[in-house]
Structure formats: structure tokens, C-alpha cells
Amino acid sequence: MQAAMMYGPNDIRVEDIPRPKCPPGGLILKVMAVGLCGSDIRNMATDSCKGRYPHIFGHEIVGFVDELDAEVPKYKIGDRLYIYPEDHCLKCESCRDGHSENCTDPGDYIARQGGFAGYVPVTKEQLERDSVFELPTGVSFERASLSEPLSSVYACQENIDITLGDTVVIIGAGPIGCFHAQLAKLRGAARVIMLEINDVRLAMTKRFGADFIINSTKEDPVQRVKEITEGRGADKVISANPSVQAQAQSIYMARQGGIVVFFGGVPKGSLCELDTNYIHYHNLWIYGHFGASSLQVQKAFELAISEKFPADKFITHVFPLKEINQGIELARNGEAIKVVLLPNRSIAIN
């Protein structure tokens, strides 16, 4: 099979390698679509595996069952499946409390073989937990691949209750920021204000429901947000980018009693200096968000495969796996919103 092998930082080679063996009690999925995630790109640009190479990344995986162990009664050859990357134990205190995003014994999807390959093994543990979802006939593999990136966005907005009439500021117009804009509109937000430093990406956010766009290198974003909100500030502010400077600035865009979310991860070791006096006197809620609970994963999947969600607007580029490096470059320079790779075909089909 073909696979995108990482041999070190920024060293990705598409090669022919042996197909993986079916794990005991598990199955082999033929990968029909796999999204190119920003975290994958970051991992492939750094020494993420601490020298343990080659490695195959890719965690936004959709395909069909090509082989399965005799001990697997639930699925059959040809079943169409979406595999959520992190399976939760459903037994620890966090899982039982409804917060499986904080599971203390999750499956380590980074250590497993990923989906930038023709075939991927799905373990018995994954099948027995909560990470496998059957894809209805007629729903495209490409659409279903958006389920994973949508899951954390869905969970965040459900947790902070973005609702009818809200004004929402989103800092960062990458794929996740665009998901946030679209979902905020679907949830009833009256105004979505998008901040970004890349004009190409900023212009694209209009298609996802952004009512106002601000290039924070060309105008004062805090002042502009206050102008748009008649001096009040936004109900919710989501910092969906890897900048501690943006996080520090985000608190000044929120209204008194508003919510500020630190959604995007920043480089390890980077510290954010916050004006805690301002937070105190403005009664601000600061919320760090990561992941999604088991039920939120399911709800996001159901939304992604429904006609309510405009998947075609997000998928700007579809490539065969051999062109992964081109996809990475387009994602890095902001020309692409969402790149989907097709390990076993060269054109998109249902």
C-alpha cells in the first residue's frame, strides 16, 4: 500500500510499504478519505516522535471495512466507518461524570499507525470503546472526514452556550476558526467578528458567516470590536490560534461578564501574561477548551453528515495521497481551508 512516511521534521515521503496485519479482535479499514489537520502538520514539522521514525500520521479517517478478525461480530466487509481518533475508557471518574474528553486512560492515537496510508488497523479496544461510527449510504467519505475537526468546535460552543443573539469574536481564520464561524451562525449568533493577519484567509471567512472581518495588523482589533458592539464588547471571544499575544489581547474584546475561550494550543513553554485585574473587575470567565466528550463526538458526527452542515464550503482541495506535501504547503500559506487526501483513489466519489 501507499503511505506518507515521516522520516523526520518536514521529511514526508510517499512510499509503498506492506499492508498492516489485522489486529486480534479488530479490523482493517481501507482509507477512502483522511483530512489534513493542522495538528498533523505541526507534528510532521517537528521532532514529534522523538527520533522514532518512520511514522505515519493522520487522524481524520473514513473508509470501509476490508478485513476483520473472526471474533468481530458487529461489522462486516464493506461497512463504511468513521474512526474518531481518541477512544475513551468510559470507566474512569471523568468519563462517568460526562467529561470523557478528560479521560485518564484514552487510546494513544499518536502512537498508532495513522490514516495517511491505504489501510489502517483498528484495534479491539477501539471497537469496544466509543470511537467507531457507521456511515450511512449516500454520505460522501469527504464530508464524513470533517466530523473529527468539527467535534472539538461543537463541544466548545455547546459548553459555552453560544446562542440566539450572541456576538462572537473568533481570533484566527484557519480551518478551525472557519468551523467556529459557521457553527456560531448555525447556533443563532447575531454577529460573528473574525480576526486574522492573513488577508486571503480573512476574505474566505465571509462564506462561513463572518459579518465583520478585521486584519489585526492593519487596525486596532480591540478598538474595532468595541466600535462594532457600540462599546459593549462581545458575549463570547474564542482565541483559535497559536499566539499568546492574541490570548492576552482577547480579554479586552469581551463584554463585562463575558466568556473568553483559549481554544488554540500555543508552543510548549510559551507563557501568556494576562491582566488579571481587568479580568477581576470585568467579571470575565476564562475557559480553556480541548477535545470533546463521547456524546459530543457523536453529535458532531451527526451534524457533519447532515445537510444542515455545508461541508462543500470547507473542503477547498482534494488530492491523492501522493500529493500530501502540496496539500501541506497550501494549508500553511492559507490558500486552503480544508485539504482532504484520498489514499485509494484520485477523484472524489460517494
Image (tube, helix red, strand yellow):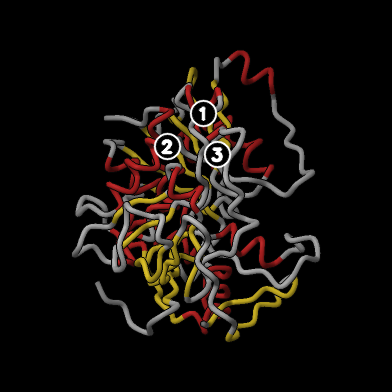
Vertical comparison of 269 with 78: above or below = above
Q: Secondary structure at mark 3?
A: loop
What is the spatial separation of the Cα atoms under label 1 and label 2, in whole angstroms? Answer: 12 Å
Disc 1 versus disc 2: nearer the observer: 1
Disc 2 crowd, CA 10 A, few/some/many (<14, 14-19, 20+):
many
Left or right for 42, reference 29: right
Check whether the beta carbons of the residues at disc 1 and disc 2 lie within 8 A of each other.
Answer: no
On the image, the x and y values in percent for residue 336 come to 46, 69
Q: Amino acid at mark 1?
A: Lys
Give the residue number, with chain letter if any, for mark 2: 294
**Sequence order check, earlier mark of 1 and 2:** 1
| Mark 1 / mark 3, whichever is N-terminal | 1
Q: Is residue 213 visible?
A: no
Amino acid residing under circle 3: Phe
* Tag nearer the camera, 1 or 3: 1
What is the spatial separation of the Cα atoms under label 2 and label 3, in whole angstroms? 13 Å
Mark 1 touches mark 3? (CB < 8 Å): no
Residue nearest the viewer, comparing 140 with 279: 140
Residue 222, given in percent of the width and then of the height, sits at 55, 37
Position of residue 50 measured from the top left corner of the image (x, y, whole percent): 79, 60
Report the side of 133 relative to 171 (left or right).
left
Q: Which mark is residue 290?
A: 3
Q: Is residue 283 visible?
A: yes
Identify the image quadrant of the C terminus. Answer: bottom left
Q: Which mark is residue 91?
A: 1
Q: Amino acid at mark 2?
A: Ser
Tell me which residue sits at (54%, 21%) in the image: 285
